[in-house]
Amino acid sequence: MRAKWKFTAPASPLEQEAKAFLQQWETNAVFQIKSSGTTGSPQTCSFQKQQLLTSATASIAAFGLDQNTRALLCLPTSSVGGLMLMARALVADFELFFQEPSSRPLQNLGQSIDFIAMVPTQLQQSLLHDLEQLKRIPKILVGGGELTPALKAACRAAELQVWQSYGMTETLSHVALQQISPTETAHYSALPGIQFSTKNDCLVIHYPQMQTQAFYTKDLVALHSATSFTWLGRADNAINSGGFKIIPELLEQKLAGHFQNPFFTAGVTDEKWGQVVGIIFEGEVIKDYLHFDGLGLSSAEIPKKYACIQVFKRTSTHKIQRKEILQSLSNADWKPL
């Protein structure tokens, strides 16, 4: 099969990376992918071609992709998102355009596109600067991190067709999808052949076509059925403040839109409460503007300390590396609120 691939810049290293992938595909070589390293050191995962075929086939069916599809690859080819889009293009025999990854992948796009896979930062910047191009794409898949309420609202206001994915490197891309625009579905729904359960309130993925053993995650979820769930946050991010369990990701949804600076929340050691909520900002903020009135926060949820980092460390897919940022902070960096 001849790959129907086109490159926006023929001299780009992307062409060499794509050729290397194609050679692996044709020789049934083992594929090795590094995890994003969002929650720890990146791990190398190995996969057989049959596993890539399994994942690609499920995604193709979910989105109705076929030989008439024109898709844009604007993610690193070394990431699971980029690798699996190449695999889908080969399995469904559709046309795939390669673009060097950037925060504005649609900026100089000269052809019509039916399908695109993006990370939240790319979606946000495209909404701000390339909205008309974005509106012309009938299927937009966003992965690599949860979308903020403000970003979801902007997608709905623009009447975009957007799906949010849940998955990881270990499962070879998404195992569940949630449509967020033009209307938002209530929860994530599994792709065919995949089921879910929980252990200690964390999601367990049963994906026998991928591997016989279940995938155990550290994602806190509300399980609605064997094929649907609501994502709440990461168990290893949870804050225990005086016996009250606080999930930072849910707290951040309440704080979303309240501050101009990018931020995240985390537990900070406290002699009286064990932990209190700390809020970490990218860039400088003025303490006088840090108030939390009218946000419906419980006393335990109200941040008690804050810190500022000039530039957040992020992964190649723009996820904030919370753990590494927190480890870089000293006691002197935290200021009381």
Image: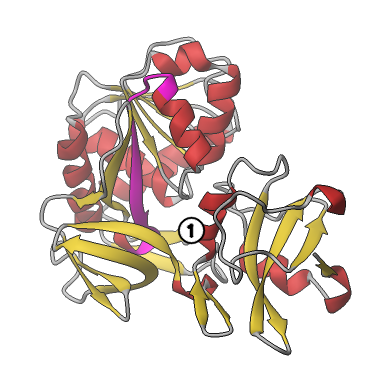
Instruction: Provide residue 213's location: percent of width, then percent of height.
Output: 20, 77
State yes or no: residue 162 in magenta. Answer: yes
Instruction: Provide residue 48's location: percent of width, then percent of height.
Output: 26, 61
Q: Is residue 298 left or right of residue 140?
A: right
Q: Residue at x 86, y 50 (%)?
A: 288
The stretch of residues the image draws in magenta is 157-170
> In the rendered image, which quarter is residue 270 located in?
bottom right
Quick check: 111 above or below 215?
A: above
Determine crowd level at label 1: few under 14, some 14-19, many 20+ residues with C-alpha closer than 10 A.
Answer: some
Seen from the viewer's position, the closer of residues 296 and 56 is 296
Amino acid type for the residue under numbered disc 1: Leu
> In the rendered image, which quarter is residue 267 located in?
bottom right
Numbered disc 1: secondary structure: helix
In the image as oriented, which residue stretches furthest toward the front?
A: 294
Seen from the viewer's position, the closer of residues 15 and 159 is 159
Instruction: Provide residue 45's location: percent of width, then percent of height.
Output: 40, 66
What residue did someone put label 1 on? 250
Q: Residue at x 43, y 27 (%)?
A: 155
State yes or no: residue 219 in magenta. Answer: no
Asked whether residue 19 appears in the rendered view, the answer is: yes
Quick check: 208 above or below 317?
A: below
Q: Is residue 2 left or right of residue 154?
A: left
The colour scheme used here is secondary structure
Q: Residue at x 43, y 38 (%)?
A: 18
Asked whether residue 284 appears in the rendered view, the answer is: no
Q: Is residue 51 left or right of residue 277?
A: left
Quarter of the image with the N terminus in it: top left
In the image as oriented, which residue stretches furthest toward the left?
A: 193
